[in-house]
Every structure is written in C-alpha cells, then in structure tokens.
Amino acid sequence: MKHFLRLIKSIKQYWGYVLLNFIFNVLSIAFSLVSMSMVAPFLGLLFGKIALTNTAPPLTFNANSIIQNFYYIISKIIKTYGQADALLFICILVVVMFFLKNLFRYMGMYYLANIRNGVVKDLRNSLYYKILILPLSYFSEQKKGDIMSRMTSDVQEVEWSIMTSLEMVFRDPLTILVYLITLTLLSPQLTIFVLILLPVSGFIIGRIGKSLKKQSIKGQRRLGELLSIIEESLSGLRIIKAFNAIDILYTKFLKKNSALTNLMIKMYRRRDLSAPMSEFLGTLVMVIVMLFGGHLVLAAHPSLSAEIFITYIVIFSQIITPAKSFSTAFYNIQKGIASAERIYEILDAKEIIEEKTNALSINKFSDSIEYQNVTFVYEKEEVLKKINIKIEKGKTIALVGQSGGGKSTFADLLPRFYDCVSGNILIDGQPIDNYKIDDLRGLMGIVTQESILFNGTVLSNIAFGQVNVKEEEVIAAAKVANAHEFIMDMENGYYTNIGDRGVKLSGGQRQRISIARAVLKNPPILILDEATSALDSESEKLVQDAILKLMKNRTSIIIAHRLSTIQHADQIVVLQKGEIIERGTHAELMSLNGTYKKLHDMQTFE
Ligand code: ADP
Ligand code: MG
C-alpha cells in the first residue's frame, strides 16, 4: 500500500485536473440520481397510481424531495395536458438527464487522461534519468534485461492497472457514498442490511487480491528473465551461431516462456474470478434487500411506500455496478502495486556517487593529479591496494601489467565512475569529490577498448555530448584522428548512419571515431584504456598515430597491452594484483631487470 500511496502522491502536481475531474464526477452522480428518481413516477403514471398533489415540499438535494417536487410538476401537466403528454414529458426529461449524466462523466474522464498519462510520463522520465546517474557498479549486479523490463513492462503495468483504476478510485467511492446516503434517507431500515452485507463481500474480494499481487511480482520477474535472454542473444548472435547454440538457447527460452505463460494463466483466471464473483454477491445482496423491502411494503401497516421502494431498488441496483468496478479496480491495483514496487526499487537505489551540495566548479586543470593511498574493493576483494602516485600536468603515465591487475579500475576512479573505498584522489590539490561531477568529467577524454558508438550519423557520434558544434570542427577532429578519409569514402560522408553500436564499421574505424570524439572535446586529461588492443597491426598504426596527435599537450593516463606503444611515457607503472610493483621510465625499468623487462622480452618474440 505504501507504494500505491506514493504513486497517488505523485498526482499532487496535477491537482488542477484532479479538481476538474472531481467536479464533473459530482455533477455526473447528481444527474444520474435525478434520472433514477423518475422511474417510479413513470411506472405510477402507467399504472394510473399517481396521486395528484397540489402542493410541493421545499426543494432540497435529496431523492425524496426531488420525487415529491416532481410529482407536483407531473400533476400539473396531467391536469392541463392529459396523461399522454405527461408520459412524453417524463421520457424527454429522462433522455436529457442521462445525456447530461454521461456528458459530465466523459468530461471527468477527459481530465483524468491528463493525470493518468502525466504520472506515467513522470515515472518513465525519472527512471531513465536514474539509470543515467546510477554508478556503473549498479549494472553489473542487476541484469540489463531486468532493468529493461522494469522500464517498459512494469511502467506499462502501472499505467494499465493503477492508472486505469484511478477513474474508479476517484469516482466510484464517491458514487457509492452518495447513493448510500440517498438510500439511508429513503429507508434507513433497508440500508442496514446493505451495510451488514457489504463488508462480508469485501473480505472475500480482499483475500483474492492479496494472492494476485504475489503472483504478479513473480510474473514480472519472469518477464525480466525472458528479456535478459533476448538482450544477451541479440548482442551475442554471432557466437550463438558459431557454437551451434541455437537449439540450446531456444530450449531455454521455451522453458522460461512457458513458465511465464503458466503463471499468467493462473493470474488471469484468478483476476477474472472477481467480476462473476462480485456480480453474484451483488445479486445475493439485492435479493435479500428485495425480500426484506417487499415485506415492509406488503405489511399491514406499511412503513415504506411502493414508489419509494421502487426508487430504492433502482438506485440500489445502480450501486452494484460501481461496487463491482471498484472491486475490479482493487484487483488491478494489487497487480499494479507489484510493478510499482519494482519501479521504486530502481528509483530508490542508493546513488553511491553523490555530489556535495557546495561542490566546487573546475574547468581548468592546472597542476597535478594525485592518488593518495587509494584502495578499491569489488565484492570484498581488494582490487587496488593503497596506490600512491602523482601525475604532473603535461606528463604521460602508462599502466601496464597482467589483465585483472586493476588498471581499468585505477582509471575508472578518476572520472568517479566509482568512488574509492579509502584514500583520496586529488586534482589540483582538492579531493575529486569536492568538485561538481559534470565539471570533473568535463576535464577528461576517455577512449576505451570497446568503442562506444550510438546509432546515428558519423557526425552525431563525433559531436556526441556537445552542443553547437560546427561541421568544420568535426571534420578537423576527424582529420586529427585519421578518420577523415574513410568517412569521406562512405556513402553519405559525415551523414552516413553507422548502425547500432557502429556495426557497419571496422574495429579500427570505430576506434578512430572515438578518438575524433575525444579530439573534439579537447579535454586537458586523457584516459586511454587499451585503445588499440583489439586492432590488427595495420589499423593499430593509424590509430596509434591518431593517439599520439591527441596526446600532444595533454596529461594522459595510458593503459596498454603492447608495451611498444608506451615506451616514451614519462612514467611507467607496473600494476600487479592491485599493487604498484615497479615504476620508472622505460630505460630505468629495463635496467631493473624485473617484471617489466620480462613482459617486454616476451612481447619482442611475439
Ligand atoms: P585490468 O584492467 O587490469 O585488467 P580491472 O581493473 O578490470 O583489471 O579488474 C581488476 C579486478 O577487479 C579483477 O580481478 C576483476 O575480476 C575485478 N572486477 C572488475 N570489474 C568488476 C566488477 N564489475 N565486479 C566485480 N569485480 C570486478
Ligand atoms: Mg582493463
């Protein structure tokens, strides 16, 4: 229920629409009440039972008074024009009343649409934003498919179940309340029966609703698993085919899918039980009311007139519909809450990377980067242990060592993709968590082994993340990155679409576009994480040349697999199991005759 209330609270900002919705609902209820009061006079007229009255009681907003006043008007019409005209008058009046009732009902729903879709829109926006700002580590724990299913199908579920039910939540209790008050005024005795019988049916309905919510959570989780398989398969199609794993994956999918289907069947059956059950319960209550009410009318000293009783039955029968849809709404909401819970789990995920409220701006790097006793832990394993290093402005340091040594982690700490567990990283003497995150990241250009490209044109990929970039600037950057020529050879030059993640390009081409992106950003600090490792030696040369141009006049941290590419670094650091075991220039490390020399010798024979 907590999550439901929270969702309802987010409606707050749409209060104007809520008000309009409320007003029109009240109007709609009022008109339906009035139109129902006309049934008894209609029958009375047909059976010739209308007692002609010459006086009217004061008009108040209650069914009894409306009926009496109505009788007065009818009496007048009958006396002046005759019964046929009176019948016509009643019929026209009923049509007008029902028209108005439904018009206002529509108006109420008209404004509800704004509320409903607004809330869902807000939910989607905040989910997407949250995904963008959550630390990278969040996503290694959570499967991508699961997150996708929360963003799409859970949001949709909330829209379908909760938001669709809003109409009923807003209107039906109001309708039921007004009707019940009217009924009490008409006949308090009869209404007592109704009040006793309603909670009993409510209890039965509530029991089913609870189990529905449990099943719904399970169902959404299974859907997430399915999406995970789809996501993994889409990105691994090449390997799946090469390893003849189509059947294996297909069988896995079939199994998961039928598990989901079975669960959904169970869930829908249970949900569908709600309508027939509440209808039956409703009829039962109705019959009891008719039986008891009939006795009151037929008694030797009737405490209830036949006309009032008929009006009572008509209004009461109308309570059943909102009561039914209210219980349906209740079921749907239970289902939707399960999804809301899953959505709020992401929205409430702790942002580990936080910006201080009085964070400093920084848009110039002027002195040095310093790692002081930096320790980082992944799942209880120390990946970096008390790292100390100082990088002066304009220098290049290279990180080498076996894979898994912590090199990428070392680099990821600088733009605060993660925060260190202990120790400090300083830029120009200030710990990096004192700076605004955007400013900090703005100082850095990053090129990694996997070039991250997006579906779009070459131009938009190079200009990624920047606004108001001129085409000439993009071309200049591409030239520095040795990318201009192959781009011009493409079908539409800079306006060629490169496909999802740049599938239409070769590895070297993708990498040069990533480099062009970094050139265009023109950051003072450069991080290159195995930027050339995935390339063949031909394209490596072109990329390497582009990297050398990019590094000019910048401070760089280079992680390289091939040592030949970093020989000229000002400082080479050998990282092993999270510790710096050697550091110095190429010449110094060679003469040290340690790990670096071993690595170097191994590669010269490759
Ligand atoms: P390198 O870049 O030197 O190959 P990394 O910095 O990528 O090394 O990884 C260092 C260690 O941290 C490895 O033992 C690796 O298993 C672990 N590691 C890296 N990323 C994660 C992660 N997202 N979750 C858990 N452990 C990780
Ligand atoms: Mg790495």
Image (cartoon, rainbow, N blue to C red):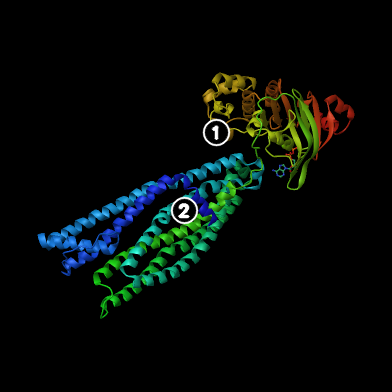
Q: Is residue 15 above or below residue 593?
A: below
Q: Which sits in the foreground, 64 or 365?
A: 64
**Residue 284 occupies which quadrant of the picture?**
bottom left
Q: Residue at x 38, y 46 (%)?
A: 111
Q: Which residue is mark 2?
A: 162
SS at circle 1: loop
Where does residue 37 sit, x and y in percent of width and height?
Answer: 26, 62
- Identify the residue under disc 1: 455
The correct choice, above or below, for 469 with respect to 73 in the image is: above
Q: Nearer the viewer, residue 417 or 103?
A: 103
Query: How would you rate the neighbour count of disc 2 (Cα within 10 Å): few for under 14, some for 14-19, many for 20 or more?
Result: many
In front of the other: label 1 or label 2? 2
Residue at image position (24%, 63%) is 67
Alpha-carbon neighbours of circle 1 within 10 Å: few (<14), some, or many (≥20)? some
Distance Cα–Cα, label 1 vs label 2 = 35 Å
Q: Quadrant of the C terminus?
A: top right
